[in-house]
Amino acid sequence: MVTLSDAILAINPNAEFEYEDIDNIFWRKKTKAISKDEILKKYRELKDLELEKVAFEKANQLTTFGKILNITNENKIYFYKYRQALATSSIIISLIFVLTNNFHKVRYTIVTDPYGTEFVYDRFTGKLKKKITY
C-alpha cells in the first residue's frame, strides 16, 4: 500500500520528515520542503503503478489447468518412467466406469425361445429365468 511517505521518498530519497496528514508535514534537518501538489502527483503515480502491478500479477496467475501442466512438466521424468503403468491403469479405470454404468447389460441378456417366450439369462451364474412382464 502506497503512503505519503513513499511519495515523498520517491521525490527525495534523503528527506527526513514527520507528518500527520498532507497539510501537516514537518521537515527535519534542513530538508528542502516539497510542495503539496508535487507530493500528491507522485502519490497518484505510485498508486497507479501499484494498481498496474496488482492487475499484472492477477493476469499472470495460473489457472487450474496451468497448474496441472506445470506439475506434469516438473514430473515428466517420473511420468516417463512409469508410463506403462499409467497407461494400463487409465485403461482399467475407464473399463471399470463402462462396466459399472452398463453392468446390467453385461450380466443379463434376453433370450427368446421358438414359441416367443422371453427368458433372462444370467451370464455370471449361468441360470435362465422366465421374464416377468408387468
Image (cartoon, rainbow, N blue to C red):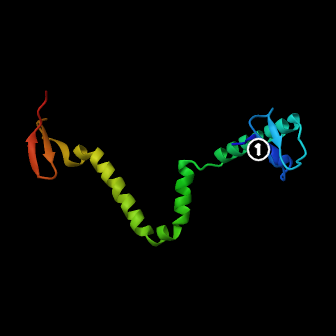
* Kind of residue at disc 1: Ser
**Which residue is at 28% across, 50% downward?**
99
**Which residue is at 65% across, 49% downward?**
60
Quarter of the image that includes the C terminus: top left
Q: Which residue is mark 1?
A: 5
| 6 left or right of 57 in image | right
**Which residue is at 32% across, 49% downward?**
98
Residue 74 in percent (x, y) is at 55, 65
Q: Residue furthest top?
A: 134
In the rendered view, would you say 32 is above or below 92?
above
Q: Which of 88 and 73 lies nearest the eye of the viewer?
A: 73
| 49 left or right of 77 in image | right
Q: Which of 95 and 115 lies nearest the eye of the viewer?
A: 95
Residue 17 in percent (x, y) is at 80, 45
Residue 66 in percent (x, y) is at 57, 52
Identify the element where label 1 is drawn. helix
Q: Which of 127 and 111 lies nearest the eye of the viewer?
A: 127
**Which residue is at 89% across, 42% downward?**
33
Q: Residue furthest front?
A: 29
Q: Residue furthest bottom?
A: 81
